[in-house]
Image (tube, grey):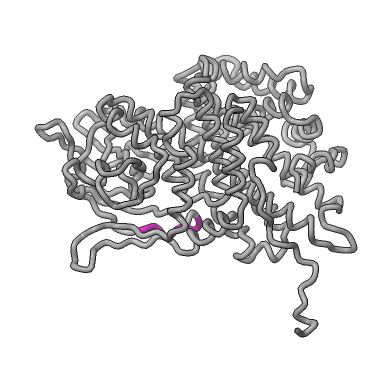
Amino acid sequence: MSRTHEVLNQPSPLPDHDVYARDPALCEATEREGAAWASEELHSLGRLAGSAEAREWGRLANTYQPVLHTHDRYGNREDRIEYHPAYHELMRTAIGHGLAGHPWVDERPGAHVARAAGFVVWSQVDQGHGCPISMTYSVVPALRHEPELAERWIPALGSLEYDPRFVPYTEKPGVTCGMAMTEKQGGSDVRSNTTSARQEADGTWRLTGHKWFCSAPMCDAFLVLAQAPDGLTCFMAPRFLPGGERNSWEIQRLKDKMGDRSNASSEVEFEDAYAWSVGEFGRGVATIIEMVNHTRLDCCLGSIATMKAALAQALHHVSERTAFGRVLVDQPLMQQVLADLTVEVEAATQAAMRAARCHDPLLAGEHDIALRRLATPILKYWVCRRSPAFVAEALECLGGSGYVEESEMPRLFRQSPLNAIWEGSGNVICLDVLRAIKRTPESLEAFFAELDGASGADDRYDTAVKELRAVFDGAVDPDSFEANARHTVERMALLFEGAQVVRHSPPEIADAFCTSRIARHGGSTLGTLPSGCDFSRILERHPR
């Protein structure tokens, strides 16, 4: 071999490891929030998530993207989507480890907390398949409005068995659920939807319309918004009719997306499609929001998983590569960047797991139930918005090699903006926070009670809480709040994160967070922590 072909100063491949064990913040939060009993299962999932085999599943599922087959070889309409076998392995693992609808049929307190931790662990392998997993989990609260549908569907949604066959749901032990809400003329303004609903004599409904986005179109059923005589209403449309015939709707095309490539997103047309009504007539948004509140939490969890996967790659690279005579991780400026990334993902993890407890029916008290109405959207807004900048900074730690596909970093970067858009972009989320404050004032009371529970630990934090409280003193003027909503929601999210960090994180991380995020003594970009922060101790939080 020519000496010019000798490979020097390159890191080894990321070794197999237990993703959960290497994440003390997640381990501690899972135990603290009520799911200590799930440790063995999470370690098992963590070992699989950290294996070369699972990472290869993620790569293959994104390289060989879903293919739409509109017709069979004879010309019959079939609307079938073909996935690479690796995608089915990802789905089988997620469902088998209870990340879909299983917590709703699991009677152990903390099942939803354990599921949130597992979602963070497994989504580090691939984020795309998390879409149908999240919707299958989140549809259950909406279905409970209809006892007959709930009795028929929830046991199958909660199954641990993945069945990818394109057959009627009555023949499958486990099923998945998607949604079709947005239309091309309205986007997030779903009240402008034009899909219509007509009732039959037997009480079922027929839907006609064009949905601009139908997520995961190979699911067994979908929640759909349509205009009924009494107004916008939520419906459930199965892929197959109870008798086994295909429902009358067609997949027009798959979306060619920037990221999220392992997951199929589509445009569909309903033409007198069979459906059942879900919830009150004319209250479709209120019904669907019960699903959306859970998928918004998953947006946050998925963004955290993307950040953790990027940080793991960065830490491994800098620990084995030298420059200017020293290993990169030992150089002060690189430590600065990595420490700041560690603080960022630690705060997001602590806050998201606190919110996950608020969604656990067997653990959440009155305070938690009120708190989740605000905690969920503010974390969805902030954590998902931070993800692209975070992944870009982690990618830069690898330099040019991070820009090539084999590093996995480009896939993570393409994925990183998605969760800020899905289930309400930034402005929509901020308006939802305003709506929550106006309609459920108890949610704001619970939010400040949560912040007050961390008072006395850091003067900078206490001062910032007082300043935020002053914003809400007296009546909230909607126009004034809306104009400053992004700033206000950002401060709410940072203080919610701060409340968890100062109570539960190591002192060096709490100090760095309050200095750089609360008191804002630092730059606006990641990697600008004040020099007084203990970078080495912070980095000990992520063993390499």
Q: Give yes or no for residue 213 being in the magenta stretch.
A: no
Name the residue rendered at 57%, 56% in the picture. 55
Name the residue rendered at 61%, 33% in the picture. 39
Q: Is residue 177 left or right of residue 249?
A: right
* Most foreground residue, 96 or 195: 96
Q: Main secondary structure of the magenta part?
A: loop
Residue 484 in sight here? no
Residue with the most extreme left position: 201
**Which image quadrant is residue 503 in?**
top right
In the image, which residues are magenta? 254-259
In the displayed structure, 534 sits above or below 319; it is: above
Residue 197 in sight here? yes
Q: Position of residue 256 (x, y in %)?
A: 42, 60
Q: Position of residue 103 (x, y in %)?
A: 45, 31
Name the residue rendered at 53%, 44% in the picture. 420
Q: Position of residue 160 (x, y in %)?
A: 42, 39
Q: Position of residue 13 (x, y in %)?
A: 69, 61
* Most foreground residue, 387 or 191: 387
Quadrant where the image shows the N terminus: bottom right
